[in-house]
Amino acid sequence: MTDLYLQDWRGWTPHRDAGNEARLDTRDKPAGAAIPSLLRRRLNLIGRAVCDMLLDLDPAADHVVLHASRHGDGDRTLEMLYALNAGDPLSPARFGLSVHNAIVGVYSIASGNRRSQQAVAASGGEWAALVAEARGYLADGESRVLMVFGDQPVPERFAEYAPATPSAAVVLQLGSERKPGARRLEESPADVDTPAPQPLDVIDWLMAGDQALACPMARRRWQLVGEP
Amino acid sequence: MTTAALENELKQTIIETLELEDVTPEDIDPDEPLFVEGLGLDSIDALELGLALQKRYGITLESDAESSRQHFANLKSLAALVESRREK
């Protein structure tokens, strides 16, 4: 099986301290500075953070991008449902941005990245799905891929149907070759009953560096091995 | 309503409807193109603006691309469209 190495990462969340970690942005409102203002206006906070992180890790914008979100943009979808219910016409911009690949779509327009992109929702198995997809691309000959995992709270109206979801997004650069500073991502079976990992859990795991991240749905766990 | 007042109202409508966060009414030149060049709006903005004209002024645009292109060329042509076709 193709080995996976974590080469670099970036994270955004206002819900924890960064300590001395320069790769984590904890501002309430990410800048979205990498995106021209006419495109940036269409992005929510997660989208602004993700675009900045992608272009920080891959300025040439030539890597495959895998994007996962459990809930996507529930706010825009709900606003459209309210409009339909009131008999109002749908907003084309809102419709265009409610789709699950909206953020990476705006990113690809702004950056000119025309490589493959995937948008995944896996009902709590997002992390495992991302790693499986990444392994596939790397086994197929890509030298590195970018893995995005981002979520925000679901609209209040749906809150009782979903676990509390703090706003957070993380982008990991994975490669199949061990490079200086890279750590191997070791995967093993695990029969656990922990909550489904969310983006903030992935950030906590990256910051700790020596713990396991488990996905109960996939019955797998992941640990970074080798010197940080 | 004078043409100048209508142009100002349309500038506000464009900024609010299209969420142009860094644009002020003074930035919109009535003679400059709204789309691609000039203000730099795109095709989704055109659809969104068409919807705003329908809601606010009761104007339904025909699906003829060439006439839409003329109506949406710049703020002046948009104001002329609203003046001649508004129902509210």
Image: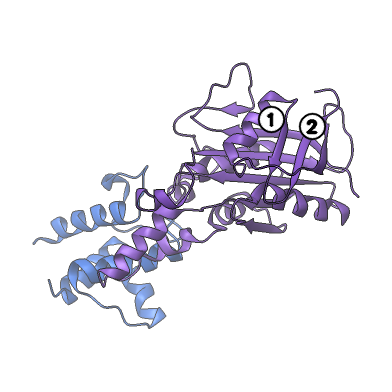
Chain colours: A purple, B blue
Question: Which residue does the image show at 63% across and 22% down from the upper left?
Answer: A22
Q: Residue at x 89, y 35 (%)?
A: A178
Q: Secondary structure under badge 2?
A: strand
Taking A194 as reference, is B86 above or below it? below
Nearer the observer, A54 or A157:
A157
The quarter of the picture where the C terminus of chain A appears is: top right
Q: Position of residue A101 (x, y in %)?
A: 57, 58
CB-based contact (under 8 Å), mark 1 and mark 2: yes
User: Is tag 1's residue or tag 2's residue first in the polypeptide sequence?
Assistant: 1
Q: Position of residue A171 (x, y in %)?
A: 65, 40
| Snapshot quadrant of residue B5 | bottom left
Q: Residue at the spot x=38%, y=83% of the render?
A: B64
Which disc, if any, is residue B74? none
What amino acid is labelled 2 in the image?
Leu
> Mark 1: which secondary structure?
helix
List the single residue furthest toward the top.
A20
Q: The residue marked by circle 2 belongs to what chain?
A: A
Res B25 visible: yes
Left or right: residue A158 compared with residue A148 = left
Q: Which residue is mark 2?
A: A224
| Quarter of the image where one finds residue A214 | top right
Which mark is drawn over residue A206? Answer: 1
Nearer-the-camera pick, B81 or A19: A19
Q: Chain of mark 1?
A: A
Q: Amino acid at mark 1?
A: Leu
Q: Give the mark count.
A: 2
Q: x, y (%) of residue A99?
A: 51, 61
On screen, A165 above or below A79? above
The CA distance from mark 1 to mark 2 is 9 Å
Label 2: few (<14), some (14–19) or many (≥20) C-alpha neighbours in 10 Å = many
Q: Position of residue B15 (x, y in %)?
A: 30, 51
Identified at 35% across, 65% down, the residue is: A81
